[in-house]
Image (tube, grey):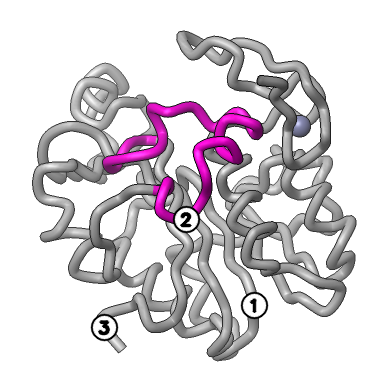
């Protein structure tokens, strides 16, 4: 089957560490980035009037969104200098700055592999994301879920080696574990079983190079598309 990047249209994919042929050679999208884009495309979530908050923006997806919503895109990160490609990128500290954003500001909020880096209470951040989302809005996010149970440590004294052992990466503050996901993220969002084949056909997923190991069960590549009613703490 001929595989195509649904973000930029390219047909060539290259290796990302141990994962063969998953990174788009043109826009650098990964499996999870293309799956986020697939939700946006399937449910028609972006148009020229959309107000979008794209946190820690991926280049290919940022270019794609800007091409449709132009100035409606707000690109933001704690370290904006790392994202020179994102037009108008702003500094945003998710642990400090969300309070200042008015209710019902955005149609779409996107974040991928962000929550595990935050040194504050993640439920606080998810509360504000819910609050600043419009009634008809969506949150599209990828939150890495790995084996075992939830674990968290914000102490600066924890060494990089210990962080890697406990959380999977030397700059992670926490990990979400599959074994107690219902007691952590599952208390904030209505999660249910993870199975994207109930939403997209297998042909669609394979065509856009979203491999079978991302289809079922919560994994580091899982993508959630959440509406206001999926938030359980309102
Ligand atoms: Zn691409």
Q: Secondary structure at mark 1?
A: strand
Q: Which residue is mark 3?
A: 233
Q: Which residues are magenta?
A: 196-220
- Residue in front for this viewpoint, 7 or 169: 7
> Could you say which quadrant of the image residue 66 lies in?
bottom right
- Tag 2 residue: 199
Q: Quadrant of residue 101?
A: bottom right
Picture quarter with the N terminus: top right
Distance Cα–Cα, label 2 vs label 3: 26 Å
Residue at image coords 64%, 78%: 106
| Residue located beneath label 1 in the image | 107
Numbered badge on residue 75? none
- The quarter holding residue 23 reads top right
Q: Position of residue 158 (x, y in %)?
A: 22, 30
Q: Position of residue 73 (x, y in %)?
A: 78, 65
Q: Height in image: 151 above or below 206?
A: below
Sequence-wise first label, 2 or 3: 2
Sequence-wise, the earlier of marks 1 and 2 is 1
Q: Mark 1 or mark 3: name the one nearer the start of the chain.
A: 1
Q: Residues within 10 Å of mark 2 (few under 14, many from 20)?
A: few
Foreground disc of the pair 2, 3: 2
């Amino acid at each position: 089957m001929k595989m195509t990047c649904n973000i930029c249209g390219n047909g060539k994919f290259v290796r990302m560490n141990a994962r063969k042929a998953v990174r788009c050679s043109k826009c650098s999208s990964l499996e999870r980035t293309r799956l986020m884009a697939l939700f946006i495309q399937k449910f028609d979530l972006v148009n020229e009037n959309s107000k979008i908050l794209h946190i820690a923006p991926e280049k290919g997806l940022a270019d794609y969104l800007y091409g449709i919503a132009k100035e409606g895109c707000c690109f933001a990160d704690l370290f904006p200098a790392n994202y020179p490609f994102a037009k108008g990128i702003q500094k945003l500290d998710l642990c400090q700055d969300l309070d200042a954003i008015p209710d019902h500001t955005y149609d779409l909020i996107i974040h991928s592999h962000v929550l595990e880096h935050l040194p504050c209470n993640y439920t606080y951040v998810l509360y504000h994301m819910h609050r600043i989302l419009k009634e008809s809005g969506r949150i599209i996010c990828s939150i890495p879920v790995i084996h075992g149970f939830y674990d968290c440590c914000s102490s600066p004294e924890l060494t990089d080696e210990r962080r890697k052992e406990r959380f999977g990466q030397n700059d992670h503050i926490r990990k979400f574990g599959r074994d107690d996901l219902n007691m952590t993220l599952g208390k904030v969002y209505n999660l249910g079983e993870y199975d994207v084949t109930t939403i997209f056909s297998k042909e669609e997923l394979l065509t856009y190079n979203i491999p079978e190991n991302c289809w079922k069960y919560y994994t580091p590549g899982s993508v959630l598309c959440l509406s206001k009613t999926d938030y359980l703490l309102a």
